[in-house]
Amino acid sequence: MLQKDDIISKLKETFASAILAVEDPDGIATFTIASESIIPVTQFLREQLGFNFLTDLCGIHYPDQELPLGVIYHLHNFQENVRVRLKAFVPGENPSIATATDLFPAANWMERETFDFYGIIFEGHPNLKRILNVEYMDYYPMRKEYPLEDPTRHDKEDQFFGR
Amino acid sequence: MEPNKYSAETEAIIKNYTTLNLGPTHPATHGIFQNILTMDGEIVVDAEQTVGYIHRAFEKIAERRTWYQITTLTDRLNYCSSPINNIGYQLAVEKLFGVETNKRIDYMRVIIMELARIADHLICNSVIGVDTGALTGFLYVMQEREKIYDIFEDICGARLTTNIGRLGGFERDFAPETIQKIKDFIKGYPKVLAEFEKLLMRNRIFMDRTIKVGPISAERATAYGFSGPNLRAAGVDYDVRVSTPYSSYNDFDFIIPTGTQGDTYDRFCVREAEMWESLKIIKQAVDNLPEGKPYVDVPEIVLPPKEEVYSKMEPLIWHFKVVMGEVNTPVGEVYSAVEGGNGELGFYIVSDGGRTPYRLHFRRPCFIYYQAYPEMIRGGMLSDAIITMSSMNIIAGELDA
Amino acid sequence: MTTYTKVAPPEGFSAPGLFATSFEKVLGLARSYSIWPLPFATSCCGIEFMATVASHYDLGRFGAERLSYSPRQADLLMVMGTIAKKMAPVVQQVYEQMAEPRWVMAVGACASSGGIFDTYSVLQGIDRIVPVDVYVPGCPPRPEQILDGFMKVQELVKNESLRKRYSPEYREMLERFSITPITPAGQH
Ligand code: SF4
């Protein structure tokens, strides 16, 4: 059986310098990885430890951090039934990170979605363009500074409470 | 002819490929997505997909709504089985708050989720029938789906966008009539399902149209992030209900049906078998429904009863606090998944202790496995492409968030 | 025993072997019981529409048995579900492709006003791009409500003047949506 601690120790052994933090918030081992080593780490997890299923990939935005934009990966090992979570943070100016599409074809659209929402460039992605929003959109709507509401609507405006 | 005699462009001209635009409002595609197909006669050479035609910005809305208000949004993800989405989200928030529910709540949830699974698979399978030319089955089983909707209506007042239950349980218990309705459904449904199976499963035309159509191997399916019935049809026995049991699923006796080929016929059969298993689960849950309160005793997330809100001070304050999101929310992050109609429906919540989630990401199974569609239809006929799409059960709401 | 009510004849003059009424009324009557709807179902409301056409509620009882997926042959555009900004040009194009006379029904809160999705990506009601005749509220509306909305459309169809689609007001209205009118101008 592959235990959480084994994964942590094995990863620490192999990638001592790339692992910036290890947490366990909800029973899933969570690693914060330097963004340039994300692919070697994922590859190691996939090939050596059997994490062959990319459950999820999504972005996150912390405007106050030094590296505000993040990419979060959830990997799953079916045989041993364990999950890991990887996080990598990138700068707000020209955010870019290597693509995982070579390892997991499933990452293709999830990366496009993350690009669409947060503007994170995935280097080496075969077809990186907007997926859900209209192509002429000129901002990245999920970043915290952009409003949710439709800008053309005036009937909901309120003098005291805004919208 | 020797290979590589012509350049690629010349070859395309010689072969005379045509481009065919399928969608976004094509009657044969059940939902709104566009495929630009390159066709060699009737054979699909390649497909280019465009999605996002009903992108509704769920994840952005979720960052502006209190924990309570988000259940309504989850309804609209996979609207064929909204209760699973609702309960999945509630389970994720309960995990964040560290709330344990009692067995009665768990069993009630299991009953609802399995009913929703039946409704979901019923639509998908009958639509495969429609696409192969058998409208009868569709009209016949819709009647049964109405019965499931009746039960939902009894429980929560809505048919489709149910918003069923609350964080921490249910607002009220099942009425005796509801339980009776569920029992009637368990009794009447096998006959209908068996007849529906008789119509299609060993039907020569149906088999010819679906076997070896749109196949995918187990390796490719895993690599593409398939989950749910589509992955199981390819032969991987992964089911969230078993691998990470939630809501007391480990109390029940059921099997995970799998296929071998990963083609349309296998997907159909896996869904059929799953409906039988769901029936089994519902039966066990109704028969052994434990006693208990239908909600947990955690004032942070459970709304107090209405009579008390109107007559007492303390419940009124709590009601206000819960509705306005003024309770103490734990800081942290959770990933919690349930087995939705289409596969692993995950909720990834990051909370900073505020009244709303800092980030809520939905892992939408449709969105992830729909990218394999070109690979699955390449080399097949156009009409097979349509059947493959309906057998994958692509739900536009879930696809586009 | 089920009792059947026949469709009431329009107002007119009747004598043995003879019935006289205006052409407009006969045409309205005929049209209203043979509407071919174009179901433009995008999301959740579309699933309720499926229930509406299926055996339990049966839209066919109102003469709308034949769903027309081709806009050219359709009389009634039923928009059901959220219309995102990416989808808006498609809706307008479908409307433009329909032949006169044409009616539009917005089914559900999303199609009527954007519904709960007051967001950057959702069109806030289809009446921003095409003229709407009947709005059906609800999220989703129950099949009964959709049927009720359909009967309202029938009412409109029945009482419509034959000259309406040629009138300058109608043309003006279409031009406000930047849709080119397809009826020839100045014919009455
Ligand atoms: S009105 Fe409600 S049910 Fe209809 S499409 Fe919009 S969200 Fe879905």
Image: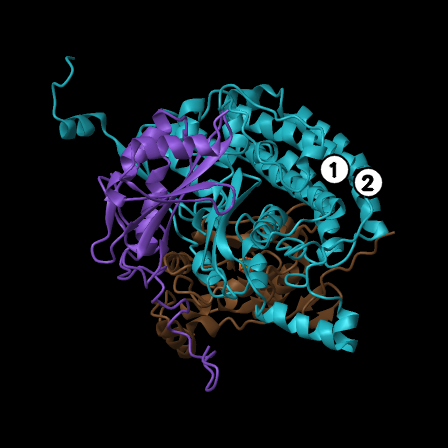
Chain colours: A purple, B cyan, C brown
Picture coordinates of residue B98 (x, y %)?
Answer: 60, 52
Type of the residue with mark 1: Ile
Picture coordinates of residue B43 (x, y %)?
Answer: 35, 26
Quadrant containing ligand 1 reads: bottom right
Q: Residue at x 35, y 33 (%)?
A: A11
Q: Which residue is mark 1?
A: B282
Q: Residue at x 61, y 21 (%)?
A: B203
**In the rendered view of the protein, which quadrant contains the C terminus of chain C?**
bottom left
Indicate which disc, 2 or 1, sits on the residue closer to the N terminus. Answer: 2
Figure check: B362 above or below B157: above
Figure check: C81 above or below C20: above
Is residue B33 visible in the rendered image? The answer is yes
Q: State the image quarter where residue B252 is shown.
A: top right
Q: Is residue B185 left or right of residue B243?
A: right
* Depth check, front residue: C130 or C2: C130
Q: Is residue B23 left or right of residue B71?
A: left
Picture coordinates of residue B354 (x, y %)?
Answer: 49, 65
Q: Residue at x 36, y 24 (%)?
A: A48
Marker disc for residue B160: none
Q: Which residue is mark 2?
A: B183
* Depth check, front residue: B3 or B225: B225
Q: State the image quarter where residue B368 is shown.
A: top left
Is residue A103 visible in the rendered image? The answer is no
Figure check: B380 above or below B130: above
Picture coordinates of residue C90 (x, y %)?
Answer: 38, 56
